Image (cartoon, grey):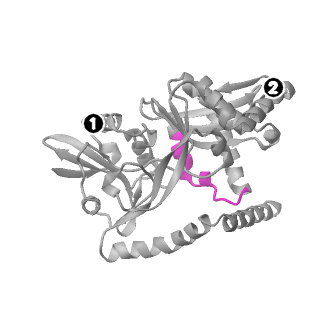
Amino acid sequence: MSVRVVRPGELREREVEVWRELRAKADGPANPFMEPEFTRAVAEVRPRSRVAVWWEDGEPVGFFPYEKGLFGGGRAIGFGVSDSQGAVLRSGLRPGARALLRACGLAVWQFDNLEDGQPVFEGAATESFASPVIDVGEGYAAYEALLRVQSPKFLRTTLAKERKLGRQADGEVRFVFDERDPAALRTLMAWKSAQYRRTGRGDRFAQEWISALVRRLHTLRTPGCSGVLSVLYVGERPIAAHFGLRSRTVLSCWFPAYDPEFAKYSPGLVLHLRMAEAAAAAGIGMLDLGRGAAEYKDALKTGELTVHEGAVVRPGVLGAVHWLRREPPLRVHRFVRTRPALAARGRAVLNGLARLRGHR
């Protein structure tokens, strides 16, 4: 067994082929964030991206994508925006987590959306989170029938608002599942930036690497990982949009937003129903709504996956330094998250600060 560490753009054709084959054989959902194309796209905007490749008997048998920081710090590829993370290994291959880090020259490796079923990192997670999903494997009609039982008020209200929008809108209401116009993507990113600021959150699209990554992924077309921009229009005017990634069978939901002028029609909810309908028609069996609690996710979901947050730390001075920098603030965040009343007050403070900034 040998390991070679390369930049993602240096992966050989056979290595990329085997990576795809291993993901196709995996037991879990075919999440597009775990495909080699996503890692390569991140590498184009994050030059410290690397992949450790395991070879045995002249064949690649495992892959571990990561970003290498200073002083031995390491993170999952696309950390902070990637919704599924981990190693891609042949069945039965299980290098020790610390040995894996040593091969990569890392003192620590952090993850915030480690996919379930990653035995190499067993015991490294400090928290686990639900990632709600929509199962449309039996078709959209079956899904809507389930919503009529599971979330009847939500479905009835959303469909009524969609009809009201159709009656009152100045133009035809139409939905495009896979919009290729870059202007529509720019509109979505502007809405999302405004939403981040309005709610007191950090604006992800103010980070150039994230904006550049999304623009690159919008043009990506491969079976395992393609960018999908879905837009709800009134006439030629977009009123809600979502950008995510799809594989053959999974649509990973990522960046949804809408025009606040149309808020009374709940265009974001209408958009998600139309996305589910179009995804089912395209042969996609699951929409992954991503980690994080939200009322709309609870109303739409048919089940949940589990993702994990944590870190692997090698013994030593550098590992200890990274642990000390990372662990105290995370403990504060966990303390707040597990106390709903405190979390609600924190959100109210953030929203108040955002409004004050907006009045300046």
Q: Check disc 2: other Cα within 10 Å, few if <14, some if 14-19, many if 20+.
A: some
Q: Is residue 270 visible?
A: yes
- Give the total of numbered labels: 2
Residue 166 shows which numbered tag? 2
Q: Is residue 49 visible?
A: no
- Residues shaded magenta: 199-216
Looking at the figure, which quarter contains the C terminus? bottom right
Q: Is residue 200 magenta?
A: yes
Secondary structure that dominates the magenta span: helix
**Position of residue 200 in the picture relative to residue 69 (left or right):** right
Q: Which residue is mark 1?
A: 18
- Which residue occupies 63% across, 38% down? 242
Mark nearer the N terminus (1 vs 2): 1
The answer to whether 1 is drawn above or below residue 176 in the figure is below
Q: Amino acid at mark 1?
A: Val
Q: Is residue 83 magenta?
A: no
How far across and how far down the image is residue 38, in percent?
43, 42
Q: In which image quadrant can residue 298 be found?
A: top right
Find the distance from the CA under tag 1 to the CA under tag 2: 48 Å
- Which residue occupies 42% across, 33% down? 224
Direction left: furthest residue: 57
Q: Secondary structure at mark 1?
A: helix
Of residues 252 and 14, which is closer to you in this image? Answer: 252
How far across and how far down the image is residue 15, in percent?
26, 39
- Which residue occupies 37% across, 54% down? 66
Q: Secondary structure at mark 2?
A: helix
**Position of residue 330 in the picture relative to residue 168 (left or right):** left
Q: Amino acid at mark 2?
A: Gly
Of residues 115 and 351, which is closer to you in this image? Answer: 115
Residue 48 shows which numbered tag? none
